[in-house]
């Protein structure tokens, strides 16, 4: 069986519209909540049409020295222009971004995944130093 590392695509988010970009709302401090924003298509917009869209993003944190990552949260995107009248007939389209808050007593690595219905699983990571 393959690991996620072998299943996940990565690239420079400034040239690829599928990579989840991780941004912190400030400098993380031990035991204090910090905001994390995940955006897919930050520099190059992802289409988010009925036929081609980001289905979800998920965020994990792996504290230094611990064996397993902790899932911080997951956001599912359900509005891609589809309606009873057919594909791309609605005026409602989901923006592929999500905000999470978490706190920790340890430094570690945040890892975000995004899932495109056509192009599969994408990922990126960010070191978090306290």
Image (cartoon, rainbow, N blue to C red):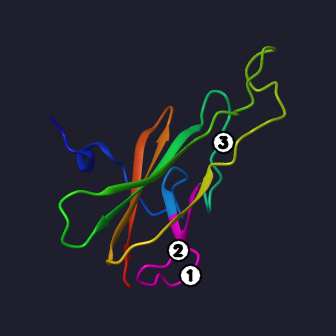
Determine the CA span between mark 2 and mark 3: 30 Å
For numbered disc 3, what is the local secondary structure? loop
Q: Which of 1 and 101 is in front in this view?
A: 101
Q: Which mark is residue 98?
A: none
- The residue drawn where x is 37% and y is 83% is 129
- Can you tell which quarter of the image residue 124 is in? bottom left
Image coordinates for residue 68, horizontal then vertical, percent: 23, 57
Find disc 2 in the rendering and name its residue.
Answer: 34
Find disc 3 in the rendering and name its residue.
Answer: 47
- Looking at the image, residue 2 sits to the left or right of residue 40; the answer is left
Q: Is residue 12 above or below residue 10?
A: below
- Can you tell which quarter of the image residue 48 is in? top right
Identify the magenta region: 22-40
Nearer mark to the viewer, of 2 and 3: 2
Image coordinates for residue 77, horizontal then vertical, percent: 62, 39
For numbered disc 2, what is the local secondary structure? strand
- Number of marks in picture: 3
Determine the CA span between mark 2 and mark 1: 7 Å
Find disc 1 in the rendering and name its residue.
Answer: 26
- The residue drawn where x is 20% and y is 66% is 66
Residue farthest right in this picture? 91
**Quarter of the image that includes the N terminus:** top left
């Amino acid at each position: 069986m393959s690991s996620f590392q072998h299943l996940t695509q990565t690239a420079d988010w400034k040239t690829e519209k599928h990579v989840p970009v991780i941004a912190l709302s400030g400098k993380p401090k031990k035991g204090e909540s910090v905001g994390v924003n995940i955006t897919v298509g930050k520099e190059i917009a992802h289409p988010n049409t009925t036929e081609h869209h980001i289905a979800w993003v998920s965020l994990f944190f792996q504290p230094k020295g611990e064996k397993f990552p902790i899932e911080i949260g997951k956001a599912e995107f359900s509005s891609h222009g589809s309606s009873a009248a057919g594909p791309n007939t609605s005026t409602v389209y989901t923006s592929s971004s999500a905000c999470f808050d978490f706190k920790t007593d340890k430094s570690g690595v945040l890892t975000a995944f995004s899932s495109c219905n056509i192009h599969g699983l994408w990922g990126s990571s960010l070191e978090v130093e306290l």
